[in-house]
Amino acid sequence: MKNILILADGIVAKHFLHRISKTFISTNSYTVITFDKSILPKNQPSFFTFYTFDPTSYIKLSKILKRDFDDIFIILKNRVDAEGSYKNIRRDKPFTRITFFNKWDIVFEDENLLSINANELLASRIYDFLPNVPVIAQNVGLGQGEIMEVLVPFGSSYVYRHIGTIIQNQWRIVGLYRSNKLILPTPSLMIKPNDVLLLVGKPSVLESVFKEIKQELGQFPAPFGENLYLYIDMQEESKECILNCLEQVTYFHRRIKGKRLIIRINNPTDIKLLEKIKSLDNENIETIIDYNYDQPESIIKIDILKYNIGLIICGYDIFSKKMYKEIFFSIKKPVLQLSQTSLMHLNKLVVILSEDKNMEIISTTVFDVASQLDLDIELLDYEPDGKSEKKSFILNHYENLSNIFSKKMKVIQGQKNPIRELATQKDFLQVVPFTKKIISNRIFSIFSTDFEKLYFKLSDNPQLFVPSDIE
């Protein structure tokens, strides 16, 4: 049995005592000290003991404090009484945990004291009733926003998507409420309008997920991470390639607003080029140079975690190497491969459709990136044997997103090989699911009819590889 001491006075204390009397826990024993008997509940359970005296009187309070208490609550309406009672308790009980009702913003230096800021608590509760505001669990977990409840509006990019196709990195959908019933999520469960999702994860990530659910574009690279990461290896890349990457990445950084750009340089060899890169440093751009010549895999993986990276950017010389593709694939972050065609000269974003579920997984990223870079979306639907049901579902999904985000989308259907059609164009960004097919051996891929394996035939244009491994 836990012994609890409560110093009570005022309307808050009255409600607190009445609530305990109705829902009290029989394994607790309560000792209540108050000025005013009128605040005491009419029905007083047997586990309550009441005293009426001034708790600021140390002589009287010390007699009660001779007992052992597991927790002490100070809920008093007057600041002088509250501080005086706290000091009296600490004279005899220096280490007992105290919960202090604090409506005066008093600052304590006490590791064993929990200060409940009444003003913040009330403001936070009222704030929860505003529209388009996430409801955060206040009294569960850390209470910092790691548990969130989100209503899925009609027209959201999450509507009619299977939970298994949503990449959940640093967050999880742990429950779904529909028609006042809890449904435990499974990969095949489809989200419908007006469903309420119960999310658990890193607070900053959940904020981005909330905005994404509420139809707000402009969050990429969330939910994969927060910041941009340009990787440069001076032994693997020519000076011209590096300068080209720097020009394009600074432009891309300006378009992806509110994100930090981390530039990592491995194997530094050109001092003048290093100085040029370092000159880009400001509050939103940070250059990191590795003079220890560490292994790329360890460098990249440490940086990804340390800087909360959401998008890796590299030149063609880097991404063409199987070692780097395997590193990037294992990290499960989007990779933007820059090319001879500058990002500044693009006018459309291209996706070659397939029947694979990866098309649904990358869909939100497609619309988000197209929106931020102000690109039209073009879907290439190659149908040599006629349309399939899976393809129809995917097209309907993209058309739904196009209407939701009011984003222009063009569907090109035909029986001609889209790789050959696109090979003659120099004005597009291709979005490709980042699957194991991308890291397969090119020699064997040449003879394949799988468009994902043939991605390298369009590498003269920039390509965005979006992870679709949802395990």
Image: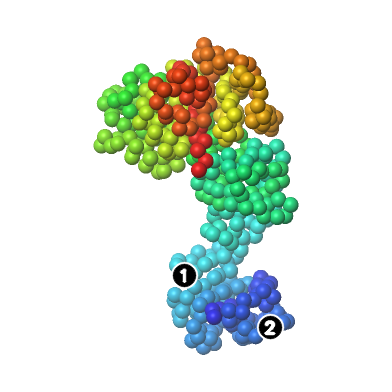
Residue 112: mark: 1
Residue 196 versus residue 314 in the image, above or below: below
Q: Residue at x 46, y 81 (%)?
A: 92
As helix, strand or loop, the secondary structure at mark 1 comes to loop
The image shows a total of numbered marks equal to 2
Q: In this orientation, which residue lies closer to the viewer: 324 or 107? A: 324
Q: Give the alpha-carbon distance from disc 2 to disc 1, as whole Å.
A: 30 Å
Residue 264 versus residue 387 in the image, above or below: below
Residue 202 pos. (x, y %): 51, 49
Q: Residues within 10 Å of mark 2 (few under 14, many from 20)?
A: some
Q: Residue at x 37, y 42 (%)?
A: 302
Amino acid at pointer 1: Asn
Q: Residue at x 28, y 37 (%)?
A: 294
Q: Quadrant of residue 110?
A: bottom left
Q: Residues within 10 Å of mark 1 (few under 14, many from 20)?
A: few
Q: Quadrant of residue 141?
A: bottom right
Residue 279: mark: none
Which residue, given by chain and number where applicable, does mark 2 sit on? 44
Residue 448 pos. (x, y %): 48, 21
As helix, strand or loop, the secondary structure at mark 2 comes to loop
Q: Quadrant of residue 17?
A: bottom right
Q: Decide: marks 2, 1 in contact (CB < 8 A)? A: no
Any part of residue 376 in sight: no
